[in-house]
Image (tube, grey):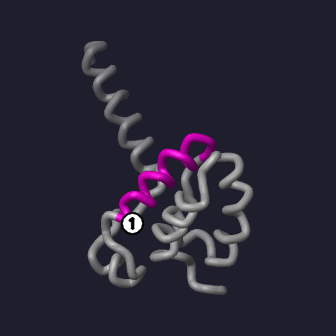
């Protein structure tokens, strides 16, 4: 095999590997909006805030990995570390709340 082909194959492999390992964050739908009682645009803002502010320090978690109680317990500390205001925290929690893990 020539080296250009090998580099191409390696590059494609790395893209697939990285894509497969990243958490699949949901994209808000109209049904999510209705469930949350907020607009799809509000949920999208929460998603963007979550990706930008939380993903800058650590890997992102899917909402369903934790219960409501667990998300609400960790958010005050994360709010301080990410330097986000109360409104931004609320938007992130609304985005995550649509898919919280069942439980308290």
Horizontal and vertical percent for residue 81?
Answer: 70, 47
Horizontal and vertical percent for residue 16?
Answer: 36, 42
- Looking at the image, residue 57 sits to the left or right of residue 64; the answer is right
Image-quadrant location for residue 2: top left
* The one of 25 and 51 positioned closer to us in this rendering: 51
Residue shown at the point (54%, 61%) measured from the top left = 87
Residue shown at the point (62%, 71%) measured from the top left = 66
Image-quadrant location for residue 26: bottom left
Residue shown at the point (54%, 68%) measured from the top left = 93
Q: Is residue 87 above or below residue 59?
A: below
Name the residue at the top extreme.
Answer: 3
Circle 1 sits on which residue? 43
Residue shown at the point (66%, 54%) measured from the top left = 79
- Looking at the image, residue 81 sits to the left or right of residue 44; the answer is right
Horizontal and vertical percent for residue 76?
Answer: 71, 61
Say which element carries label 1: helix
Most prominent secondary structure in the magenta stretch? helix
Number of marks drawn: 1
Image quarter in which the N terminus is found: top left
Q: Is residue 94 above or below residue 17?
A: below
Q: Is residue 18 magenta?
A: no
Q: Is residue 23 above or below residue 4?
A: below
- Looking at the image, residue 76 sits to the left or right of residue 42; the answer is right
Image quarter in which the C terminus is found: bottom right
- The magenta stretch spans which residues? 42-58
Instruction: Give neighbour class at mark 1: few <14, some 14-19, many 20+ (Cα, 10 Å).
Output: many
Horizontal and vertical percent for residue 20?
Answer: 42, 50
């Amino acid at each position: 095999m020539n080296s250009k082909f090998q580099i191409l194959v390696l590059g494609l492999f790395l893209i697939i590997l990285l894509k497969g390992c990243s958490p699949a964050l949901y994209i808000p739908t109209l049904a999510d909006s209705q469930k949350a009682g907020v607009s799809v645009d509000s949920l999208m803002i929460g998603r963007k805030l979550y990706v930008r502010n939380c993903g800058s320090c650590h890997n992102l978690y899917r909402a369903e990995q934790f219960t409501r109680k667990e998300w609400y317990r960790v958010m005050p500390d994360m709010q301080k570390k990410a330097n986000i205001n109360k409104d931004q925290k609320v938007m992130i929690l609304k985005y995550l709340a649509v898919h919280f893990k069942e439980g308290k």
